[in-house]
Image (cartoon, grey):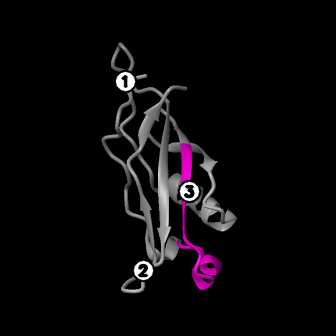
Amino acid sequence: MLEMLALALLQASPAAADYPFRALREGREGVTEFGVRTNPQGLVIECWIIRSSGSPDLDAATCRVAIRRIKVAPPLDGQGQPQPAQWTSRMEWRIDGSGPAQASPQRLTETAQ
């Protein structure tokens, strides 16, 4: 399978405000692996969890951030027309004592539909 990396990953990086309050208060961190389906315009139309962080609120926040912020350059068909696609990635949720809590998305990788 040929994997393509998205040209444009995120419109804006997830902010500390994206960190679920209860998870932040309880000091919960984790990594959520997720998948998204994008339309021909490169916008996320569906998100699902592949591997949970172990925290349902971090997992739910992952999809909220993905749906709100991810925009990809869609793959093109043989006639140069943009196509829907499926992508996978990971979101790392960390609380750093020296700064704000962070949600760090990893690169999106195109997967076979």
The quadrant the N terminus occupies is: top left
Which range is magenta? Answer: 19-35
Residue 44 in percent (x, y) is at 52, 44
* Viewer-nearest of discs 3 and 1: 3
**On the image, which quarter does residue 42 sit in?**
top left
Q: Which mark is residue 96?
A: 2
Disc 2 packing (10 Å; few <14; some 14–19; many ≥20): few
Q: Looking at the image, is mark 2 or mark 3 earlier in the sequence?
A: 3
Circle 3 sits in a helix, a strand or a loop, which is it?
strand
* Viewer-nearest of discs 1 and 2: 2
- Using the rendered image of the protein, determine whether residue 41 is visible from the camera's viewpoint: no
Tag 2: amino acid: Asp
Tag 3: amino acid: Thr
Distance of label 2 from label 3 (alpha carbons): 18 Å
Q: Would you name the residue on which mark 3 appears?
A: 32
- Number of marks drawn: 3
Distance of label 1 from label 2 (alpha carbons): 40 Å
Nearest the viewer among 110 and 95 is 95
Q: Are marks 3 and 1 in contact (CB under 8 Å)?
A: no
Nearest the viewer among 21 and 94 is 94
Query: What residue sits 65% from the left and 62% below the top?
Result: 54
Query: What residue sits 59% from the left and 74% below the top?
Result: 20
Q: Would you name the residue on which mark 1 appears?
A: 76
Circle 1 sits in a helix, a strand or a loop, which is it?
loop
